[in-house]
Image (cartoon, helix red, strand yellow):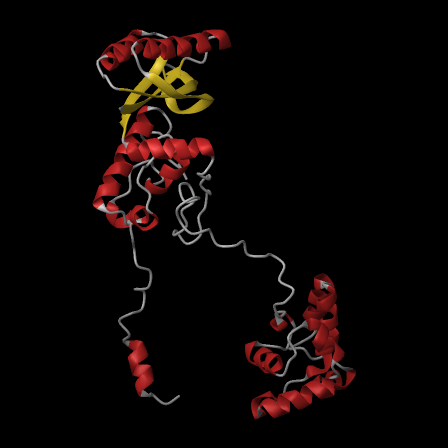
Amino acid sequence: MAASRDDIKFLSNPNIGQQRKKYCRFRKFGIKYIDYKDADFLLQFVNDQGKVLPRRITGNSLKYQRRVATAVKRARHLAFMPYLTDLLK
Amino acid sequence: MRNYEVTFIVDPVLSGDEIKATAQKYVDQLQGSGASIVNVDEMGLRQLAYEINKRHTGYYYCVEFQSETTGYLSSLELNMRRDERLLRFLTIALDKYGVKYNADKRAGLIGKTKKKTKGGADMNTPAAAAAPAPKPKIVKAQPAQPDNLKRIEGIGPKIAEVLKTSGIDSFAKLSTMTPDQIKDLLNQAGDRFSFQDPTTWPAQAELAAQGEWDKLKKWQDELKGGKVVTAASKDEEE
């Protein structure tokens, strides 16, 4: 195949792998309250050891990341979620 | 008017009556202090995420109440702390969104989270009322979709494309054609396809259309590149 200008463009395309934009799901869907009793929902924000995931992974805004963290901590206090485990997921 | 929510865990080893009596005691104490009870949620016996006082389950209660004054809260908590029948308790002040959330939850407007969400963008728990509806379920059986003609030995991705563009997109259709017709099609499509031998393709397609995958596989093991090993070519090998 002849090396055309299109090929060159494709090989050094900077947009590869930059597709999905991360967003705060609470902002986007207008969710204002995070229930600490809903362990299934909070599992999304916790890794498989039970630790709270950082904001750069979950994509949350600062305000909601803090709320998520307090919800997880309350859930832990009330034994809806563990403090530390293995193979949570 | 302030809204509060207290969640507490009663020791499960007590008898059912004792558990209910314990919970009732605190409800009465709240009412006696001038709070109006919004809701008492008896969440029932649940598995604890870790053991508390050597117990693995607990009887959960969640009481939502509201009042103008707040003085009684500390004495309520003190009583809970002293009570040996309670394993844990937690009192929370609810903001207006929390109140609304609880009200919606009681009205059934909030659906359950799905365990595995698609693509990470679906939000199901609080999304029933607010957010757009989740994607429709993908139908398992897709009769309208074309069959995967590559299952037939001798048909690769390029030839499958050629067949599709000329209108043959299912095993049933392929089985009705004669090898010569197929050969004509291939010749029209290009020179590179002229050496392909479609003799067995209609027969393979018929098996596939009927769903006889076992028979097809057995036969394909005997075929080499889709060609039947005839007596003539065997002679040539010798």
On the image, the x and y values in percent for residue B177 come to 74, 81
Camera sees residue A17: yes
Give the quadrant of the C terminus of chain B: bottom right
Residue sitting at 41 percent across and 50 percent down?
B122
> Is the residue B151 above or below the residue A3 in the image?
above
Residue A67 sits in quarter: top left
Whether B122 is drawn above or below B174: the answer is above
- Given residues A11 and B96, the one toward you in this image is B96
Q: Where is residue A42 in the image (x, y as percent from the top left)?
A: 36, 37
- Determine the residue positioned at 78% across, 82% down: B231
**A58 relative to A88 in the view: left or right:** left
Whether A54 is drawn above or below B155: the answer is above
**Total numbered badges shown on the rendered structure:** 0
x 38%, y 8%: residue: B25
- Quarter holding residue B154: bottom right
Question: Where residue B138 sits in the image (x, y, percent)?
Answer: 55, 56
Q: In this view, does B167 lie above or below A33?
A: below
Q: Which of A28 and B12 is in front in this view?
A: A28
Can residue B228 be seen at all in this image of the molecule? Answer: no
